[in-house]
Image (tube, rainbow, N blue to C red):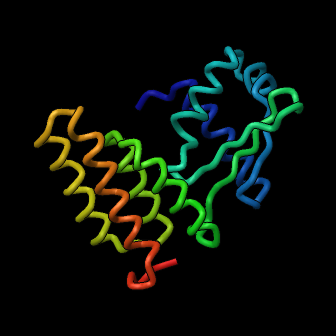
Amino acid sequence: MTYTLADAIEAHILNLMDEARQGLVEVRRRELADRFRCAPSQINYVLETRFTPERGFVVRSRRGSGGGLLINMVTYGKTADILRLLHRQAGRGLTQSQSLDMVRFFSGQDIITDREARLFEVAITTVSSAFPEQVAVPLRGRLIQSWLEVLMSSSHPGGV
């Protein structure tokens, strides 16, 4: 498997999070770009594709801190907040990749069972193969929203 610059940047940030042991790390775009001898836009690319809410991360800019960013790994105790955030995001529609990332995140956090994850992955891939993308994007978003509504309700065994 090819190890890309994006993989190296992602691994470095995850290592920083492990060292901090808080699931929260502050980084500076320019410092990372200098360390990896790349443009700051490449750091943005990694943050936008690898540290997404669907994968269990929230990235916030810190104004006035010279490109400072807070990267927060969402943990079970913060699940209700991330569910609401993802619910809003799903309302705009979701790609297959975004949808599957959400399912895998919640499975990895033991918020849903492996069986529930497999069922939802099948539903997502079925929508993707059965409809053109312009129909599938909003449909996947609505499916995920409905699923999140069940997770947020007290009727789901793992409800939050």
Q: Nearer the viewer, residue 10 or 137?
A: 137
Q: Residue 47 is drawn in which quadrant?
A: top right
Q: Number of marks in the image?
A: 0
**With 26 as the anchor, is 14 left or right in this view?**
left
Figure check: 148 above or below 19? below
**Residue at 81%, 34% in the rendered image:** 68
**Residue at 71%, 57% in the rendered image:** 23
Q: Position of residue 101 (x, y in %)?
A: 41, 50
Figure check: 110 above or below 34? below
Q: Position of residue 156 (x, y in %)?
A: 39, 81
Figure check: 142 above or below 35? below
**With 79 as the anchor, is 14 left or right in this view?**
right
Q: Position of residue 123 (x, y in %)?
A: 20, 56
**With 90 as the anchor, is 46 left or right in this view?**
right
**Residue at 79%, 22% in the rendered image:** 30
**Residue at 44%, 78% in the rendered image:** 153
